[in-house]
Image: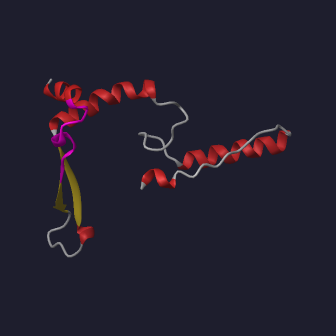
Amino acid sequence: MYLLRDFHKGGSVVKDLNRTFIVLIPKVKNVKSIKDLKPISLVNSLYKILASRLRKVLSLVIGESQMAFVKNRQIDDSFVNTYEIIHKWKNESEGGLVVKVDFEKAYD
């Protein structure tokens, strides 16, 4: 409950909630390269609880058209869907509009 209280007081999330430790676990006995290591993220238990709770309701908020960053969906599917729609428009003489938006700056 302290998380919610502190959030409402200061409007920020507790710093420890975002803290993650990455541990490198060897895949083989004699590690010679970074490829021989497997990274494991150790996250805060409160973070895990919030993530499992949010997972149950996110499907109600995230639309069917959202392809990236959603489990069992891939952004590549959007390319295939777009191609199929354009192909249908061309074959059936339907009108349509395609808009390409560059979100590059969103990930800086």
> Residue at horizontal 43%, vertical 53%?
107
Judge from the rendering whether residue 51 lies leftward or rightward of residue 72; answer left or right. left
- Residue 36 in percent (x, y) is at 23, 68
Residue 78, placed above or below residue 27: above
- Residue 102 in percent (x, y) is at 57, 52
Toward the right, the furthest residue is 93
- Residue 37 in percent (x, y) is at 22, 64
Toward the front, the furthest residue is 10
Judge from the rendering whether residue 82 lies leftward or rightward of residue 20; answer left or right. right
Residue 13 belongs to the span the image colors magenta: yes
Q: What is the basis of the colouring in this image?
A: secondary structure
> Residue at horizontal 51%, vertical 30%?
63
Residue 95, placed above or below residue 7: below
Question: Which quadrant of the figure contains the N terminus?
Answer: top left
Question: Which quadrant of the figure contains the C terminus?
Answer: bottom left
Judge from the rendering whether residue 104 lies leftward or rightward of residue 22; answer left or right. right
The image quadrant of residue 23 is: bottom left
Provide the residue span drawn in magenta: 10-21
Residue 27, placed above or below residue 74: below
